[in-house]
Amino acid sequence: MATLRILFTRLRAEEKLLKEAAERLGIPCELQNVSDSVFGGAPFCSADDVVLSRCVSHNQNEAVARMLETQGVRVVNSSRVMELCGNKLSTSAALEEAGLPQPRYLVAFTPEAALAAVEELGYPAVCKPVSGSWGRLLAKLNDRESAEAVFEHKSMLGAIHNTFYIQEFVDKGNFDVRAFVVDGEPLCAIARTSGHWITNTARGGSASNKEVDGELASLLRSVHAAIGGEFLAVDLFKSGGRWLVNEVNDGGEFRNSIAPTGKDIPGAVVEAAWSRRG
């Protein structure tokens, strides 16, 4: 019998909510810790199964998806979508190719080139790791001295940090928006409010319901067309009267968004995944 398999390396509230939603909807489902699993030998599961891969580490999650896909297993989201969303440069390039509005960004590979890039964008600017979540290792560069210090520090952290992704700082007020797209259609959105310029709920931002109007819905559909995937979490903010896409996440957390929006996010996700079987 086909089964929806929810894979994890750390059992968070989201994975428990997905399992509960599957049981409520009558979908055969198993939670499976893959921390000690080996991939690439005997078939991991039936090719009729559908896998929701929810490993905390993005690199591990993408590796799991890719290995299962070689065995003909349908993974939600696919490794291609994970690859696009897991690298901010790849995400920005895909959005740019699709002509979608986003903050200006530049990329450099040495501290000297990064300094030239930030001065081209103008202060303040934001330096982001190309891979990461929860607002970690973001740095607001207010002037040349702070930029020099951040770039020197990053240059000593290892190869991945020597790709300097620098984005213009957008005055978004005290909030941004996290929107959820399931099966290509906007499901709901929250406004994340904070006194800090980083508004992630993981960093203490408060969540409230945000109506998805026609303008926002149209943009979210276009983001899905550019990225793909059964479940996307899209971060946006409004500046100068228009929406800008900041980031796109393939395995976003949603525990803090269910109550404010009143939407059954885990139920929508497991239904979308289960519809991919066969």
Image: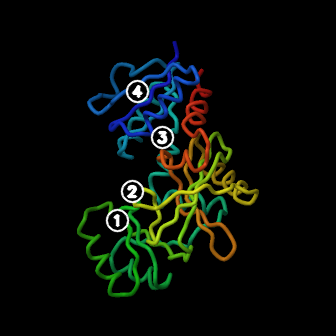
Please tell me which residue is depicted at 32% across the width and 60% down the height of the picture.
160
Q: Amino acid at mark 1?
A: Leu
Please indicate whether residue 203 sits to the left or right of residue 225 in the image.
left
Whole-Å distance between the Cαs marked 3 and 2? 17 Å
**Mark 3 or mark 2, which is nearer to you?**
2
Cβ–Cβ below 8 Å for labels 1 and 3? no
**Could you tell me which quadrant the C terminus lies in?**
top right
- Asked if marks 2 and 1 touch (Cβ < 8 Å), the reply is yes
**N-term-proximal mark, 4 vs 2:** 4
Q: Secondary structure at mark 4?
A: strand
Q: CA distance from mark 4 to mark 2?
A: 25 Å
Residue behind mark 3: 79
Identify the amino acid type marked 3: Ser
Secondary element type, mark 3: helix
Q: Which image quadrant is residue 196 in?
A: bottom left
Q: Alpha carbon of mark 4 to alpha carbon of mark 1: how far?
A: 31 Å
Q: Secondary structure at mark 2?
A: loop
Residue 32 at x, y percent in the picture: 37, 27
Looking at the rendered image, the disc whose residue lies closer to the viewer, 1 or 3, is 1
Per the rendering, the mark at residue 132 is: 2
**What residue is disc 4 on?**
31
Residue furthest toward the left? 156
Q: Residues within 10 Å of mark 3 (few under 14, many from 20)?
A: many
The residue tagged 1 is: 137
- The amino acid pointed to by label 2 is Gly
